[in-house]
Amino acid sequence: MDDCLFCKIADGRIRGDMVYQDDKTVVFKDINPQAPTHLLVVPREHIPMVADMTERQSELVGRLFYVAAEVCRKGGISDYRLVINNGQGVGQTVFHVHLHVLAGRPFHWPPG
Ligand code: 5GP
Ligand code: ZN
């Protein structure tokens, strides 16, 4: 996608603070962190939101959780919150699917 921010970060047109990359996935630091650790796990393929994914893409979206767990394990992080916002009404601002990884402070439940 030509005008998508996370497509641009994933393919290097815009610089991101990368912490992990593979052929299907990138992980970079959130520019406006909401916790001491705030990473975004992003598929290279453009999917606007969870509600748009096809069954074929479900493996890729599942992979985001695997990559999040691997990055946290390698970073010595055992407790973390994983969040995906689906839709403007719940706070989605970038319409390229991404998994937030938040850690390093207490988190409340239910979330606000
Ligand atoms: P959403 O609100 O869509 O669930 O999450 C979008 C996230 O992307 C926000 O947490 C926001 O801080 C982050 N973000 C927005 N623009 C940029 C950017 O240019 N670089 C990085 N690294 N993160 C960004
Ligand atoms: Zn995109």
Image (tube, rainbow, N blue to C red):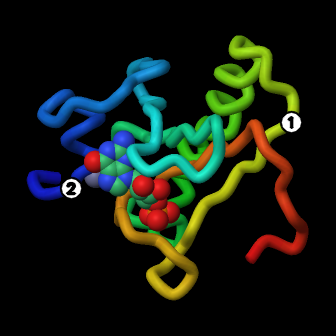
Label 1: element kind: loop
Q: Is residue 94 left or right of residue 92?
A: left
45 or 38, nearer to the observer: 38
Q: Is residue 56 left or right of residue 10?
A: right
Q: Which mark is residue 68?
A: none
| Residue under the point 17% across and 36% down | 14
Query: x, y (%) of residue 11?
Result: 22, 31
Residue highlighted by disc 1? 79
Image quadrant in which you'd find residue 17: top left
Q: Which mark is residue 4?
A: 2
Q: Earlier in the sequence, mark 1 or mark 2?
A: 2
Q: Residues within 10 Å of mark 1 (few under 14, many from 20)?
A: some
Q: How many marks?
A: 2
Looking at the rendered structure, the kind of residue marked 1 is: Asp
Instruction: Report if residue 73 is visible in the image.
Output: yes
Q: In the rendered view of the protein, which quadrant contains the C terminus? A: bottom right
Question: Compared to 22, does 95 lie above or below?
Answer: below
Instruction: Report if residue 97 is visible in the image.
Output: no
Looking at the rendered structure, the kind of residue marked 2 is: Cys
Q: Tags 1 and 2 in contact by the CB under 8 Å rule?
A: no
The residue at the far right in this view is 109
Question: Compared to 26, does 48 lie above or below?
Answer: below
